[in-house]
């Protein structure tokens, strides 16, 4: 699913346009963010693609939701 990741005043947030949903990132697998998973405040876990550690935000990417439909 397409998501937009941006840096907010309170940390990272993810916006899912199809669901009109914006949630804060509460936990990440890797400090560099890319190539691992992120947990959102609503409990969703998204797998992020491999990208360079210095990739600039905001960015729209394809992420995969674990444990259900997108």
Image: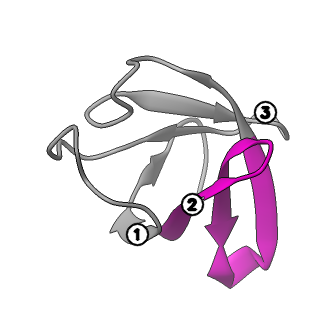
For the residues bearing labels 3 and 2, Cβ distance under 8 angstroms: no
The numbered mark at residue 43 is 3
**Above or below — where is 22 with respect to 36?**
below
**Which type of secondary structure does the marked residue at label 1 adopt?**
strand
**Which type of secondary structure does the marked residue at label 3 adopt?**
loop
Q: Identify the residue position indicated by label 2 in the image.
A: 6
Q: Position of residue 48 (x, y in %)?
A: 36, 44
Q: Earlier in the sequence, mark 3 or mark 2?
A: 2
**Above or below — where is 29 with respect to 6?**
above
Q: Earlier in the sequence, mark 2 or mark 1?
A: 2
For the residues bearing labels 2 and 1, Cβ distance under 8 angstroms: yes
Q: CA distance from mark 3 to mark 1?
A: 22 Å
What residue do we see at 33% from left, 28% from top? 32
Q: CA distance from mark 2 to mark 1?
A: 7 Å
**Which type of secondary structure does the marked residue at label 2 adopt?**
strand
Which region of the structure is painted magenta?
A: 1-24
Q: CA distance from mark 3 to mark 2?
A: 18 Å
**Mark 3 neighbour density, 10 Å: few (under 14) some (14–19) many (20 or more):** few
What residue do we see at 59% from left, 36% from top? 67
What residue do we see at 61% from left, 46% from top? 68
**Above or below — where is 39 with respect to 27?**
below
Q: Identify the residue position indicated by label 1 in the image.
A: 59
Q: Position of residue 17 (x, y in %)?
A: 65, 81
Left or right for 56, reference 58: left
């Amino acid at each position: 699913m397409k998501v937009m990741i941006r840096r907010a005043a309170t940390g990272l947030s993810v916006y899912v346009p199809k669901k009109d949903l914006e949630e804060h990132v509460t936990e990440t697998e890797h400090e560099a963010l890319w190539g691992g998973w992120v947990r959102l405040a609503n409990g969703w876990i998204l797998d992020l693609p491999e990208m360079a550690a210095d990739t600039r935000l905001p960015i729209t990417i394809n992420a995969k939701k674990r444990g259900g439909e997108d």
